[in-house]
Amino acid sequence: MNSNIAQTLVWDHIRRLTTGPARSPLARIVKRIANVVAECNYAQRRSFAIMTTPDSYLTDRDQAPDTYAEFLFRTSGGLLHEPASAQRAYGRPAA
């Protein structure tokens, strides 16, 4: 099963557990754990993107690239996809 599909199914199940007039203590704990896992996932993806960016290893990274080839090298790292605002949950980071 695709990880995005599995993650969507898990979030849908958590939303069903945690919505309604009175949430059970178990549902609140599950929601908190899910939020911590989501935040750790975001932090891991972000730190990996920063660490693998070629620009972070340059000594003159504050300077503009001199050639087009250098520009392509600097932007060759993994870029994070930013979802549309309608797909992004309120208060969540973009990436």
Image: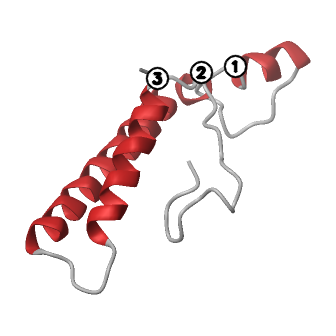
Decide which of tag 3 and tag 2 comes sooner along the chain.
3
Q: Residue furthest right?
A: 68
User: Label 2 near label 1: C-beta < 8 Å?
Assistant: yes
Residue 27 position in % (x across, y down):
17, 66
Residue tagged 3 = 2
Q: Residue furthest bottom?
A: 21
Name the secondary structure under disc 1. Answer: loop
Q: Quadrant of residue 21?
A: bottom left
Total numbered labels: 3
Residue tagged 1 = 76
Q: Quadrant of residue 44?
A: top left
Relative to 20, say whether 64 is above or below.
Answer: above
Q: Amino acid at mark 2?
A: Pro
Front residue (pair 71, 43): 43
Instruction: Classify the position of the N terminus by image quarter.
Output: top left
Residue tagged 2 = 54
Relative to 87, say whether 80 is above or below.
Answer: above
Q: Residue at x 50, y 34 (%)?
A: 50
Decide which of tag 1 and tag 2 comes sooner along the chain.
2
Q: Residue at x 72, y 25 (%)?
A: 75
Front residue (pair 3, 84): 3
Quote the CA–CA distance across marks 3 and 1: 26 Å
Q: Amino acid at mark 3?
A: Asn
For mark 3, does the 10 Å Cα neighbourhood hold few (<14), some (14 to 19), or many (20 or more) residues?
Answer: few
Q: Is residue 13 left or right of residue 78?
A: left
Q: Residue at x 10, y 66 (%)?
A: 26
